[in-house]
Structures are given as C-alpha cells and as structure tokens.
C-alpha cells in the first residue's frame, strides 16, 4: 500500500492530513526542512535549477527514504504557477533515476473540479462524489483554520510580554488539528483557540512597525526557506502578515465556500494589483502585489522582498515593488537567497532595515 | 502616431504580424536599431543583474526607443491552448514576455506602453484580443478585422519562407546576407530566437560557424510539424510548460535524427528559467546519438572564450 505525504508549505500538511483521515487513509507527516536536504538538492539538480527546485528535491528524497512514494500536491489557476509542472516532473524524474522508481506526484485542484475529483477518487479508493465533496470541505476548513491561527500568532508575537508564549499557543492548537477528520472540528478548534488567545499577555500599547513581506509562492510559506523572516521581524517588534496564504490560493481561486470568504478576498487583492499589473506572469503574482499594496494602504512602512536565485517571478517582482516603494515613499529590501546565503547575514540586513524605518519615522 | 517596437525579444518571431497590424490601423511603426555594445550597456545600467541577457538587451532597446515614439508596443504573450483547451494542457511563454509591459511601465513610468494580448489556439494567433485592442484605440471593427487578416497572412508567409526557402529571420526581416558554405557539413543551431539571431548578444555565432566551413540549420528552418513530433520524445513523455522550450526540444530531437547534421549547438541565456529543468534531461537523451554542446551566454561572455568553446566542439565532431 503506497504511503502518502504532501508539499512542504507551512501548515498545509495538517489540512491534507485531515482529509486523508476523513477518508480513513494513512498520511505521513512531512519532515522538518534542513540543510542536508539543500545539500542533496544542490548535488543532484540540474546546474541552473532555481533554489526551490534544489530544496524541494532534497525534501522529497527525505520522504522517499521514509518509504513515501506518492505526493499529493494542490494547484491553482490551471497550474500556471511559474514552471509548476516542469518542476514536479523534473523532481519526479530525478528521484526515479536515483532508485525511487515509484515516486509519483498527484496534482489536485489546479485542473478544474472534474479532474481533481478523478485524482481524489483514484487515491482514496473510489469514494462517492458526495464523500469526496465532504473531503474537499474538510481540507478547506482545516486549511482555513491553520491560516487563521497563523495570522493571529503573527499579530500577537511582536506584542507578547512573555517571549515564546505565542508560539506555545500556536503549537498547542495546531497539534489539536492533527486529529481532525470531520468538517465541523476545525471550526470548534478555532473557537477554542480564540478563547485561549486572550491568555497570551500582550503589550497592546506597544509602538509597532508594520512591514509588507512578499516573494514567490514557493518560498514565502516555508520558514526554513525564508530564514523564518516573519518570526525574526516579530522579535524585532515588527508586525508582518503571511503573504499568499494557501487559503487564498486554494479556497479563493477554486471558489470553495468558507467562513472568511476567501473568494471575495482574493478578488479584492487582485483588484488592488491592477494599478501596477495587467498581466499574470505566475498564478500568485497579482495576489502578491495586491497584498503588498493593501498592507501599505493599511500602514505598512516598508516592503521586504525575499528572492531566491533563478526565480523568474521574483526577478519580475523587483522593479514593480521598487515602483510601489517609490509611489508610497517606503523603503524596499530585496534579499536574494542562493545555496550559499547565510541566516546571520540576513538577520543583520533585517535589523538594519528595521532601524532605517525607525529613523525615517522619527 | 509613432509606435515603437524593440528589435529584441520576440521581434524575430512575430514582427511581421505586429508591423502589418499596426500599420494597417494607420500607426507609424518605428523599429529600434540593431543591438550594439553601447545599446547593451544602456540596458545593463538599468536592468536587474539577475535577469537573463535577452532581457538586458530588451532594456537597451526600450531606452533607445522611448524618446523617439509616442508609445511602445510590447504584446503580452499569453497562453497557447491546444485542442479542446483543457486546464493544464496549455503551454506558456517565459514570464518575462507575459509581464514585460508591466515591468517596463514600472521602470519607465513616463513612457506609454501598449500591451495587446497575444494568445494562441493550436498555433494560430487568436483574433479577439487584437480586435479589442484596436477598439480601445478607436478603430472600427471592419478595419480591425481587415488588419488582423492581413497581419496573419503576412506572418504565415514569413514562417513558411523560413522553412521553404531555408532562410533565417535575419535574412527575411533585415535583408541580411548569410553566406552558407556550399559543401560544408551542417550544424544544428538551436536556442531562443532572440539569442540565436542577435549578433551582438551571441557574438555572431552563425558567422563563426560559417567562417569555419559549417552550414547552419536553425530551429526556424524546420517545419512546425517536426518540432511537434520531437517535443513528445522528452523522456517524461509530456510537453514542457513552455512553448518555445517545447519547440527547442522538438528541434533538438529532430536534428539528432538527421544523418546530414554533424552536431548540435544549443545556445541558452545564462540563468534562463524555462530551459533549466528540461535542458539537462534532453541533453542526456540526445547526446547518445549526436554530439551536442550547450553554450550558455551572458553579457560577460567574451569573444575569445566563445571562440574556444565553438572550436573545441567542432574539433570533436567526427570527420
């Protein structure tokens, strides 16, 4: 019986796990990303491969070593996220050449409803259409909850009076999501988490700086990839919103009903991006630009753009973000990560950037 | 009204269509001069260092054009749909060509950029976006339709001439004379048209091969049907995400089968996003049947270095 796991993206695996449990199937939790994955990816990837390719290749190889042979990946908007399919096909081919001959990716959600259900049916052992609809709703309800909890944590962390209290709270409630297998459970967990949220002691009057954080979809979700930017900034007293959330991308673009009405939110951000963007070079591009503009409209005082070497959408983000920065008169920090970039160097640049904003404010 | 078209990027592929369409609508088309070192230097001053060489060249052309025209036309190269157009079966142009006008508008906010959508169905340019574009500029529907038909026919003739007359875009668009040696062996030269035909960017690669007694057969000289057959031979049995990448692989596989082709040079811009993943796999497949060399070019590629690479490759081709 094949073992399944998913894409490494923040807490998305918890939603995937909930759906698998709803269908009574086993799901392997993805491993924490680490430097050895990057080293493996660097050694085995094509020379010009972008950094996401290299890191994810190492990550999937780690899963393959654990016996996982099937990866369930969700997609959006006709799978036109950059070179989406070439990335997966390339990784699949490399891993098969390395001896993991059954390694297979299943793409779900990016090809429209019919094909997505066919994929789901194949993986879950032929459930009824009604059951599959239920599965999608379990997935989206759990996904929404992970993103809502994460957003709350990102708001509380810069204001917390006891260092680490927010992360403890987040960990506690995310752990509870691991047991979800019914649609109504994520909502109950969210409500209980909201009640518990008041126990995080916060300095509500603290002078907080807001910064917009953005970058290509593949890296802004994974803390290992972006050197844990959000947490680092939070610790410097900066509030940052998680960009391009999976809820917006999956629930919003596939128009699945949700409490937070992600479909409307998604349209709102796309509309915001129109001043600077008329095309769609990658599936998340308008969302990323729209979110940055919205953050600036709501008081953000700088833009941090996390790039990775070889990423085309990121290169295109750069001049557009620079123009937005000029129009809003805010500084823009572009940081490009390649296989040799160091966490310490990035920390220094973040600290300097925050100092710059503080001085500008005075 | 003067409308500028940069002699860069997809100019080598779609210029006849763009020029005919705009001129039939009554606009005066102004083309930038051929790339030279000074123009490239202008581009290098502004473009992101991470961008590929063809994009840096494009920046140079925009700088050269922007004060001479009323607007610059940079079509938004969109989706290429195939068959019934099911989700996930389309192929795409490199993101730079999708969002080129948006990027340039951010770089040069005082310049007007036109961004007509250019999409395809089974390799045919779709009419609707061009008619809408004409309508936005106050052109009546009849004139727009006439302009589209005329532009499409001109484009078809241009593509056919490359195959039937075995002529490169340089010869057809710029009346440039390329003297192919009469008895030389043939080298297949594959790569992005904006690199293969920009003599400044590629340091006159075609000329170098001709001077060394080799004939050159480029991707554009091959029938599209052969390119389509070839693209299906990629070892993972599925087209790539990218339209031009598929054509390149189609060309490489096709040229690999030809007994009169002595070797293949695949020229790619350094840091080219679309080519990087599949390139590795294609080369592994094709090198079993034909000598193949990948030459990666950026703005710091020097004459001596390139000449050495080319000579070394030509030397290893069996006589």
Image: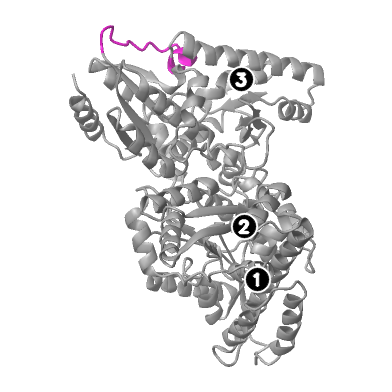
Q: Are marks 3 and 2 on the same chain?
A: no
Q: Residues within 10 Å of mark 3 (few under 14, many from 20)?
A: many
In this rendering, position of residue A4 left or right of residue B135: left
The residue pinned by badge 3 equals: B17
State whether residue A340 is above or below residue A254: below
Cα gap from disc 3 to disc 2, whole angstroms: 47 Å
CB contact under 8 Å: marks 3 and 1? no
Mark 3 vs mark 2: give the one in front.
Answer: 2
Q: Residues within 10 Å of mark 2 (few under 14, many from 20)?
A: some
Residue A276 makes an appearance in the image:
no
Residue A250: percent from left, percent from top: 68, 58
Identify the subunit bearing mark 2.
A
Cα gap from disc 3 to disc 1, whole angstroms: 55 Å
Identify the subunit bearing mark 3.
B
Q: Was residue B249 drawn as part of the magenta stretch in this picture? A: no
Q: Are marks 2 and 1 on the same chain?
A: yes
Of callouts 2 and 1, the N-terminal one: 1
Span highlighted in magenta in the image: B168-184
Residue at image x 65%, y 69%?
Answer: A24
State whether residue A244 is above or below residue B288: below
Q: Image quarter for residue A74?
A: bottom right
For the C terminus of chain A, the image quarter is: bottom right
Q: Secondary structure at mark 1?
A: helix
Mark 3 vs mark 1: give the one in front.
Answer: 1
The residue pinned by badge 1 equals: A21
Q: Was residue B178 drawn as part of the magenta stretch in this picture? A: yes
The residue pinned by badge 2 equals: A123
């Amino acid at each position: 019986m094949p073992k399944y796991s998913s894409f490494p993206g923040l807490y998305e695996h918890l939603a995937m796990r909930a759906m698998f449990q709803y269908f009574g199937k086993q799901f392997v939790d993805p491993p924490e990303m680490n430097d050895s994955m990057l080293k493996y990816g660097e050694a085995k990837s094509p020379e010009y491969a972008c950094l996401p390719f290299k890191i994810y290749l190492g990550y999937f190889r780690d899963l393959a070593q654990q016996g996982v042979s099937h990866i369930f990946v969700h997609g959006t908007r006709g799978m036109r996220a950059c070179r989406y399919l070439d990335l997966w096909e390339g990784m699949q081919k490399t891993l098969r050449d390395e001896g993991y001959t059954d390694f297979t990716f299943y793409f779900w959600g990016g090809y429209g409803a019919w094909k997505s259900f066919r994929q789901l049916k194949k993986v879950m052992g032929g459930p009824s259409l009604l059951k599959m609809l239920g599965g999608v709703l379990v997935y989206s309800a759990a996904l929404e909850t992970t993103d809502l909890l994460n957003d709350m944590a990102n708001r509380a962390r810069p204001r917390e009076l006891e260092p680490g209290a927010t992360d403890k709270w987040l960990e506690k409630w995310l752990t509870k999501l691991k047991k979800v297998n019914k649609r109504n459970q994520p909502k109950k967990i969210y409500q209980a988490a909201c009640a518990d949220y008041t126990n995080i002691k916060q300095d509500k009057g603290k002078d907080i700086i807001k910064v917009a954080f953005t970058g290509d979809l593949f890296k802004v979700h994974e803390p290992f990839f972006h050197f844990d930017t959000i947490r680092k900034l939070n610790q410097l007293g900066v509030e940052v919103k998680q960009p391009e959330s999976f809820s917006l991308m999956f629930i919003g673009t596939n128009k699945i009903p949700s409490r937070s009405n992600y479909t409307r939110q998604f349209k709102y951000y796309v509309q915001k991006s129109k001043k600077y963007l008329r095309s769609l070079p990658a599936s998340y591009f308008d969302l990323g630009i729209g979110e940055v503009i919205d953050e600036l409209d709501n008081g953000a005082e700088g833009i941090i753009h996390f790039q990775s070497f070889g990423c085309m959408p990121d290169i295109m983000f750069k001049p557009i973000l620079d123009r937005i920065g000029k129009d809003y008169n805010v500084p823009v920090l572009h940081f490009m990560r390649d296989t040799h970039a160091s966490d310490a160097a990035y920390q220094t640049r973040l600290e300097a950037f925050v100092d710059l904003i503080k001085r500008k404010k005075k | 009204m003067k409308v500028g078209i940069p002699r860069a990027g997809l100019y080598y592929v779609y210029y006849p269509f763009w020029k005919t369409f705009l001129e039939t609508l009554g606009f005066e088309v102004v083309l930038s001069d051929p790339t030279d070192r000074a123009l490239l230097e202008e581009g290098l001053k502004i473009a992101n260092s991470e961008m590929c060489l063809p994009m840096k060249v494009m920046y140079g052309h925009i700088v050269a054009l922007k004060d001479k025209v009323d607007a610059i036309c940079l079509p938004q190269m969109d989706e290429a749909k195939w068959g019934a157009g099911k989700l996930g079966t389309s192929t795409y142009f490199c993101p730079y060509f999708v969002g080129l006008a948006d990027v340039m508008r951010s770089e040069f906010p005082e310049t007007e950029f036109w961004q007509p959508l250019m999409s395809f169905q089974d390799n045919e340019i779709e009419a609707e976006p061009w008619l809408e574009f004409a309508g936005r500029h106050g052109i009546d529907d009849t004139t727009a339709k006439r302009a589209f038909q005329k532009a499409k026919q001109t484009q078809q003739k241009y593509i056919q001439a490359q195959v039937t007359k075995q002529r490169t875009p340089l010869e057809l668009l710029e009346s440039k004379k390329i003297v192919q040696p009469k008895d030389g062996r043939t080298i297949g030269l594959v790569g992005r048209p904006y690199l293969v035909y920009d003599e400044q960017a590629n340091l006159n690669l075609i000329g170098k091969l001709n001077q060394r007694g080799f004939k050159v057969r480029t991707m554009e000289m091959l029938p599209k049907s052969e390119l389509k057959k070839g693209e299906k031979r990629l070892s993972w049995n599925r087209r790539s995400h990218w339209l031009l990448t598929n054509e390149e692989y189609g060309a490489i596989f096709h040229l690999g089968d030809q007994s009169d082709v002595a070797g293949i040079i695949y020229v790619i811009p350094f840091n080219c996003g679309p080519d990087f993943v599949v390139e590795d796999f294609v080369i592994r497949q094709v090198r079993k049947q034909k000598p193949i060399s990948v030459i990666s070019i950026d703005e710091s590629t020097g004459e001596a270095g390139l000449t050495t690479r080319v000579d070394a490759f030509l030397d290893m081709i069996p006589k």
